[in-house]
Amino acid sequence: MTALLEVEDLRVAYGKIEAVKGISFSVEAGEVVTLIGTNGAGKTTTLRTLSGLLKPVGGQIKFEGKSLRKTPAHKIVSLGLAHSPEGRHIFPRMTIEENLLLGAFLRKDTAGINKDVQRAYDLFPILGERRKQAAGTLSGGEQQMLAMGRALMSQPKLLMLDEPSMGLSPIMMQKIMATIAELKAQGTTILLVEQNAQAALALADHGHVMEIGKVVLSGSGRDLLHDESVRKAYLGED
Ligand code: ATP
């Protein structure tokens, strides 16, 4: 069986600086896969490259068996890859509902779109309660929910989440992680980038530890969670 996403020896550079130095991993349909690692390891660069926002200098990206190397970003969305970016990038003056609808910009099935707006409100009731309010009035955690809801509006085959827990209170972080677990239970395939290694590994099927542009360790979420070097480096244990 071919994986939904296959990344092979991927290399990405900013000018002369190579930020991703030949990484390989894959994501099977229905799985949650996480990339963990410290600041600057190359996680965001990897997601931005998979979305087509950066072009690789080497390696291969295959989605459903087809190469994405030359595919422009808007086409990648229409193939079924959605990205909820680091820092959220919501439109603060537009309403919550308008922000959600932006995620459906490539769709024409009004009935299906309305159904998915409702699904986002079921997943995140606060968004439904405040649907007509400017998105800029939401708290950081609520904006994160909106960014995830918006990414889901394109009905992605693969949902990529970049640091959804960043800057959130512990309670809000737990809510976001519980929602990711719920999406997984509903069958959504997710590639999750997180600095909160504990939370990410606890719900991931597979994890890859990145350090300065390379994958230094891979395994099941459970194995990595119990790995001594991971515990020391990322879970704050001596
Ligand atoms: P973080 O959690 O801080 O986002 P990360 O693992 O996502 O970390 P990246 O943001 O992918 O890491 O950064 C990887 C490397 O590329 C870093 O050394 C970073 O300084 C560098 N880098 C990122 N964006 C640019 C850019 N636009 N121009 C030049 N260098 C960049």
Image: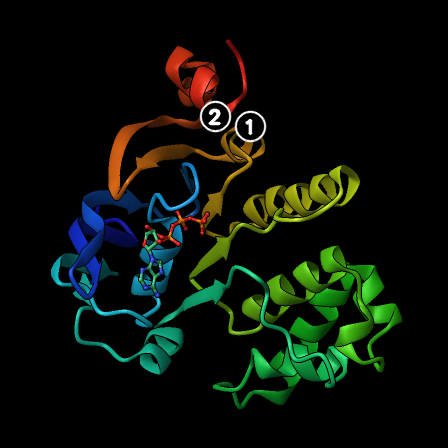
Asked if one can make out residue 123 in the rendered structure from this viewpoint, the answer is no
Q: Is residue 225 left or right of residue 92?
A: left
Whole-percent x and y of residue 140? 73, 59
Q: Nearer the viewer, residue 30 or 129?
A: 129
Q: Nearer the viewer, residue 209 or 108?
A: 209
Residue under label 2: 234
* Residue at the image point whose x is 38% and y is 33% from the top: 206
Q: How crowded is the residue under tag 1: few (<14 C-alpha within 10 Å), some, or many (20+)?
A: some
Asked if one can make out residue 67 in the rendered structure from this viewpoint, the answer is yes
* Residue at the image point whose x is 20% and y is 56% from the top: 17
Element at label 2: helix
The numbered mark, 1 or 2, whose residue comes first in the sequence reads 1
Residue 227 lies in quadrant: top left
Residue under label 1: 198
Residue 215 lies in quadrant: top left
Whole-percent x and y of residue 120? 70, 66
Q: Is residue 199 left or right of residue 18?
A: right
Q: How crowded is the residue under tag 2: few (<14 C-alpha within 10 Å), some, or many (20+)?
A: some
Whole-percent x and y of residue 108? 53, 90
Whole-percent x and y of residue 33? 41, 41
Answer with the quadrant where ligand 1 appears in the image.
bottom left
Residues at discs 1 and 2 in contact (Cβ within 8 Å):
yes
Q: Residue furthest left?
A: 58
Q: Nearer the viewer, mark 1 or mark 2?
A: 2
174 relative to 235, above or below: below
Q: Amino acid at mark 1?
A: Gln
